[in-house]
Image: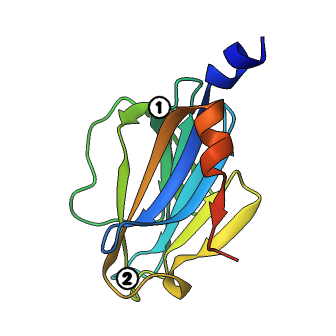
Amino acid sequence: MVLIGSLMPVNMLEVSNFHDDKVMLRKRVEPGFTFTTLITHSVHLTPVYEYYIIDSKGDITLTGTKFVDLGWGVPSTYDYETIFADNMLELKDMNIPIDWLPFRVTELNDSKLILNQERTIELNEYFDNNERMDIRVERMSRFKYWIRGETDDFQ
């Protein structure tokens, strides 16, 4: 019974530095775990949020975005629920699956990563200007998880 349990998969959120492939965060997450990226728009100097959720299979889904003004490139037609509140436009129920998230950390956009609406990581303190951060979910057996453990360099 213990052997079977040790083979059951778990979802591991991994945040790594693309430049040196260093895993900065490896954390077991349950289905429904959310994370948010937050930047300051470099021209308008307003916040831009992107919301993600992880499902039971370890898939990442972009669920929505919220912004004041993004300028050129904002789609004029789309099928997402749209809400205007607190002087911000929010697109909800986007449900766009992604394999992984490459994210550029720059001094201009004051990059942040918010984990499950509980913890905010100031990414500019951990990444050099213009470095790429990758976010992905790895499914692994409990046994492999017990051997690898968790990592958190954002302390």
Q: Is residue 116 left or right of residue 12?
A: right
Label 1: how many Cα within 10 Å (few below 14, some 14–19, many 20+): some
**Image x and y of residue 95, in percent:** 45, 30
Q: Name the residue under label 2.
A: 106
Residue displayed at 65% across by 32% down: 142
Query: Which of the two residues, 76 or 116, is positioned nearer the viewer here?
Result: 116
The quadrant holding residue 62 is top left
| Image position of 25 with respect to 92: above or below | below
Residue displayed at 33% across by 73% down: 20
The quadrant holding residue 135 is bottom left
The kind of secondary structure element at disc 2 is: loop
Query: Which of the two residues, 91 or 129, is positioned nearer the viewer here?
Result: 129
Q: In this view, does 112 lie to the left or right of 129?
A: right
| Quadrant that contains the C terminus | bottom right
Query: Which of the two residues, 57 or 90, is positioned nearer the viewer here?
Result: 57
**Image x and y of residue 35, in percent:** 59, 51
- Inter-mark Cα distance, 1 to 2: 27 Å
Label 2: how many Cα within 10 Å (few below 14, some 14–19, many 20+): some
The kind of secondary structure element at disc 1 is: loop
Residue displayed at 47% across by 31% down: 59
**Image x and y of residue 98, in percent:** 36, 38
- Specify the label residue 154 is tagged with: none
| Quadrant that contains the N terminus | top right
Q: Which residue lies furthest to the top in this view?
A: 1
What colour scheme governs how the chains and residues are painted in the rendered image of this protein? rainbow
| Image position of 151 with respect to 85: above or below | below
